[in-house]
Each structure stands twice: as structure tokens, then as C-alpha cells.
Image: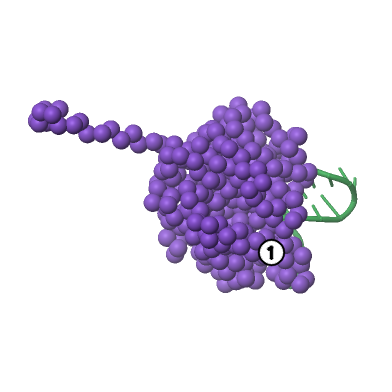
Chain colours: A purple, B green
DNA sequence: ATGGTGGCACCGCCA
């Protein structure tokens, strides 16, 4: 106060809202791993959690457990046995009923979107679980691979349409996209070129989807492309940590107007070593909204 | 070169 000229205005106090903390995690059964969700919350303190592979019909979703962790707002889309996505939030949100496609016309519970009531205004949040695609990377010999490619092609057309309508604004797209697009998103680029998740047809398709929506790769915003970055380690390794044959299958993308707000990230690798771990680990991105 | 593990459903499917 001292030294201010008489009549000068006090500087406006800019209240810096806490950045939005978004987590994505392929939980591989929400009922089996509900206790691990508490460990995730303790480690990462998210505002919103996007889950994939909940493997849980809506009527059996563990609402009580999620609510007890502070996630009082929930959107779920599940089915018996397979797939399933859920958005758990401490912030209120509006649902977008009817705004989103039924991907490949299968009704298979692989996408859910909400309008989050974030500190700086609404944020459009998409939670995706792209098909894994089976073992044989050939659409003629493997209908699961064909489904994967068709799904990504539909998502690319959807992104392009949104871009033509003005583009994604204040939006994030997260989830298990089941594709590791960059050379250092896998433990051996050469050895995985013919392995589903890292074949050129898949990585090119995902890159095209990203470009069509002008999405920004939030994890690679923080981690240079020449550094290894994984979010998944197979259950079929004798010692996943020692062999470290990981892949980056889980992603956080943000629209151009949010890219400048990116503040931090964390890949919770410790979670792969938890008792009864999922093969995917939670990924956090913090973004000012 | 092969098979390795895990969840859920139901005795195979999917990842």
C-alpha cells in the first residue's frame, strides 16, 4: 500500500483457480478393483476419473464406493462381462445424451462424454475405450482388427465434422485408445511393427484422428518424443518391471485452446505393482481451465 | 518359436 499514489486503484486480485485434475485408467473390472480406486485417489487427488473396462452392467455399478471417495457425480455405460466406461467426478456435469454416435452401430459401451462444470467454465470431456483388435493385424482375416480400424475411422470422421463446425473448444479426449502411436511409445519399435497396437496402419489412423480434431497430445507435451513412455505392461511377463516391455496405450488429448493451460502430468507406474493390479496404470493430467 | 496371465462367464471369450 505504501507508495501508491492517491486515487490509484488497487491491483485486481486474480483468483487462480486450481487446475483441473483429470485421470484416465483402464481398471479392468471396477468391482474387483474398487479398493484400488481408493489408492488411486490417495496418490493423485483427481477431480475427475475416466475409467475403461469396467466390465460391469449399470445395475451392478458400485455407486456407493465411488461416492464414498467423494465422486458424487457419475456417468456410467456398462454391459455384462466386457468393455464399459465410467466418468466419476467431484465436479458437477451435464450429460450429452444423443450428442454422440453409437460407434460402428454396436452399442458396445466404449464411449461416454460429459460437460464438466470446471472452474473456468464448461469443459467437454470424452472417455474412450477403442477396441483392442485381436492378435492378427489383418482386417480380412480378423474381424476384431477390422472393427478397431472402422472405429478409429468413425472417430476421425466425427472429429473432422466437429472441426468443420468450429472445432473442439475447451475439450479433452482421454482413454484406453489401444494404440501406441510413436516410436518410443513401445519398448521396441522394430519388434512391434507387426504387433497389433503399433502397426503402421493403426499408428497412422490414430495420428489422422488426432489431426482431424486438432487434438494435442498432453503426455508428449511433457515428455519428449525421444524418451520412452508406457502406461501398460502385459500380465504375461514373468517380471513386468525387470523386462519393462511396456506400451503407451492410454492417452490424454486436449483441444488447442486448453494446450496452453497444461500444467503437469503423472503416469502412476507404482500402480502396476499393486496387489491385484490392472495391466494399465492411471494417468493424470493437470490443466488450467 | 512358443506361450506366458488375468477377468468374467459359464466350461470359452476377450484382453
Q: Secondary structure at mark 1?
A: helix
Residue A45 visible from this viewpoint? yes
Q: Residue at x 44, y 55 (%)?
A: A256
Residue A43, percent across and down? 51, 37
Residue A96: quarter of image: top right
Residue B10, percent across and down? 89, 46
Q: Which residue is mark 1?
A: A150
Give the vertical position of A270 relative to A59 (above or below).
Answer: below
Q: Residue at x 56, y 29 (%)?
A: A70
Residue A254 visible from this viewpoint? no
Give the vertical position of A8 relative to A197 (above or below).
Answer: above
Q: Residue at x 47, y 57 (%)?
A: A216
Count how many numbered circles sit on residues in the image: 1
Give the vertical position of A92 relative to A211 (above or below).
Answer: above
Identify which residue, A27 or A127, lies in the foreground: A127
The quadrant of the rendering that contains the N terminus of chain A is top left
The quadrant of the rendering that contains the C terminus of chain A is top left
Residue A282, percent across and down? 56, 45
Dot 1: chain letter = A
On screen, residue A109 versus residue A271, left or right, reads: right
Identify which residue, A55 or A239, lies in the foreground: A55
Identify which residue, A207 or A250, lies in the foreground: A207
Q: Residue at x 65, y 71 (%)?
A: A194
Residue A179, percent across and down? 60, 61
Give the vertical position of A61 relative to B9 (above or below).
Answer: above
Q: Residues within 10 Å of mark 1 (few under 14, many from 20)?
A: some
Q: Residue furthest front?
A: A165
Amino acid at each position: 500500500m505504501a507508495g501508491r499514489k492517491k486515487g490509484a486503484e488497487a491491483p485486481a486480485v486474480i483468483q487462480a483457480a486450481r487446475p483441473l485434475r483429470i485421470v484416465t485408467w483402464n481398471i479392468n473390472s471396477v468391482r474387483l478393483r474398487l479398493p484400488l480406486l481408493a489408492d488411486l485417489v490417495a496418490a493423485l487427488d483427481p477431480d475427475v476419473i475416466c475409467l475403461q473396462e469396467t466390465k460391469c452392467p449399470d445395475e451392478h455399478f458400485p455407486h456407493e464406493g465411488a461416492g464414498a471417495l467423494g465422486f458424487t457425480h457419475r456417468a456410467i455405460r456398462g454391459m455384462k462381462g466386457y468393455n464399459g466406461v465410467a466418468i466419476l467426478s467431484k465436479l458437477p456435469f451435464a450429460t450429452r445424451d444423443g450428442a454422440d454416435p453409437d460407434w460402428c452401430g454396436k452399442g458396445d459401451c466404449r464411449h461416454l462424454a460429459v460437460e464438466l462444470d470446471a472452474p473456468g467454465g464448461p469443459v467437454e470431456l470424452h472417455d474412450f475405450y477403442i477396441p483392442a483388435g485381436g492378435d492378427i493385424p489383418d482386417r480380412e482375416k480378423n474381424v476384431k482388427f477390422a472393427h478397431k480400424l472402422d472405429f478409429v475411422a468413425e472417430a476421425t470422421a466425427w472429429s473432422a465434422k466437429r472441426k468443420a463446425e468450429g472445432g473442439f473448444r475447451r475439450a479433452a479426449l482421454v482413454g484406453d485408445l489401444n494404440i501406441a502411436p510413436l516410436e518410443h511409445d513401445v519398448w521396441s519399435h522394430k519388434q512391434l511393427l507387426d504387433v497389433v497396437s503399433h502397426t503402421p496402419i493403426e499408428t497412422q489412423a490414430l495420428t489422422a484422428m488426432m489431426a482431424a480434431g486438432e487434438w494435442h497430445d498432453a503426455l508428449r507435451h511433457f515428455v519428449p518424443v525421444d524418451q520412452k513412455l508406457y502406461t501398460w505392461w502385459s500380465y504375461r511377463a514373468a517380471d513386468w518391471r525387470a523386462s519393462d516391455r511396456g506400451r503407451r496405450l492410454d492417452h490424454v488429448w486436449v483441444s488447442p485452446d486448453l494446450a496452453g493451460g497444461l500444467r503437469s502430468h503423472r503416469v502412476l507406474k507404482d500402480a502396476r505393482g499393486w496387489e491385484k493390479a490392472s495391466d494399465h496404470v492411471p494417468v493424470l493430467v493437470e490443466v488450467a481451465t
